Amino acid sequence: MEKILATGGTGYIGSHTVIELIKKGYEVEILDNLYNSKIEVLDKIENLTGVRPKFHQIDMLDENGVDKVFEDGNFSAVIHFAGLKAVGESVEKPLEYYETNIGGTLNILESMKKYGVKKIIFSSSATVYGEPESDVCVETLPTGQKLTNPYGKTKYMIEEILKDYAVADKDFNVTILRYFNPVGNDESGLIGEDPNGIPNNLMPIIMKVYKKEIPELSVFGDDYNTRDGSCIRDYIHVVDLAKGHLLALENIKPGVSIYNLGTGSGTTVFEMIDAFEKASGEKLPYKVVGRRAGDLPALTANPEKAERELGWKAEKTVEDAMRDTINFLRNN
Ligand code: WQD
């Protein structure tokens, strides 16, 4: 049975992907420092799959710790989720973001090189497109231009590191997955997006408003040139995203492959609020405030390449994601 190392595997996207991997018969080990996740996720993975992945509570920056995991691991591939991911925080703490995301990734790559692990799937982000000339992104769009925050720059730089390494080692295979806006959770409601601290993203904030931990949602601007004035994004169900990783793993090709993982359709902030209210049966308190710096009016994926080459297509809708989110909220 192929053994996979999932760095950041107790996190939101990582844990959903670990579940799909186990269901497909892979043996999975997790390396995570629990900075933005909880150890209880392991119990929930075991509850959902009957398997408790071997867990290494290790920081990517702990070179010796990382090396020991690989020395014993005999992994056939790494799925690299681990990293700091708060856009706003990255502007305030750039050194921490570069050290953790870039330095941590280099430690992982050094150990992969030392122990002959030749396949990596990297959790990247649509943010690497910066301010693209088209608001529908294809993988051939230029990246790394007009990036507005260190978080996005680390994702771009790691993509470049992986591309350069694949040139130096022809046997090293890289798959880069550019996520759009992940939402939702496993239909069991046992696991879901549950970040430590104050979230940045729309859905975890809506979840905190629903739980009355935050009095109301601030809508960052209703004066954009969109159908209702609020920004449009491509919200993709995290289970579809997880399945995309599985297909990427099963279709790894020599060199570097890059795929957008998005639905291809856009939803406005007001439409997200409406969808959440329909799923919860309750009004969601919000107020319109000024625009957030760096926000683009619209950004959605052209997911045709993943469909063509991986046979992957998002199946779940925003309504499915809201239903599953309410289920998670009511279970926790
Ligand atoms: C979505 C929409 C906001 C919060 C970022 C990263 C990207 C990826 C996903 C990691 C925007 C609006 C939000 C709020 C609001 N992250 N909003 N009030 O900015 O599209 O993308 O997260 O991979 O890399 O760039 O996501 O969820 O922050 O915002 O009105 O309190 O919701 O203006 O239009 P974003 P988001």
Image (cartoon, rainbow, N blue to C red):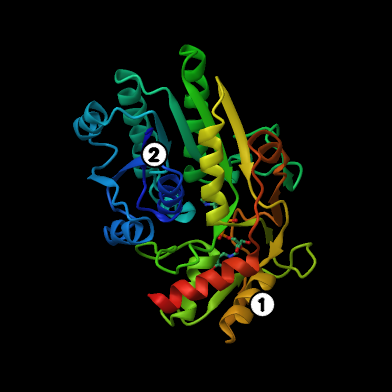
Q: How many marks?
A: 2
Q: Which residue is mark 2?
A: 101
Please tell me how crowded label 2 is: few (under 14), some (14-19), or many (20+) other residues with Cα within 10 Å.
many
Q: Is residue 206 left or right of residue 140?
A: left
Q: Is residue 208 left or right of residue 130?
A: left
Which quadrant of the figure contains the N terminus?
Answer: top left
Where residue 158 sits: x, y (%)?
A: 47, 32
Q: Where on the picture, by quarter, is residue 304? A: top right
Q: Residue at x 78, y 63 (%)?
A: 226
Q: Which mark is residue 274?
A: 1
Where residue 172 sits: x, y (%)?
A: 46, 19
Residue 235 seen: yes
Distance between the Cα atoms at labels 2 and 1?
A: 35 Å
Quadrant observed for ligand 1 in the rendered image: bottom right
Q: Where on the picture, by quarter, is residue 223? A: bottom right
Front residue (pair 196, 310): 310
Q: Residue at x 74, y 63 (%)?
A: 224
Where residue 81 sits: x, y (%)?
A: 42, 43
Residue 290 seen: no
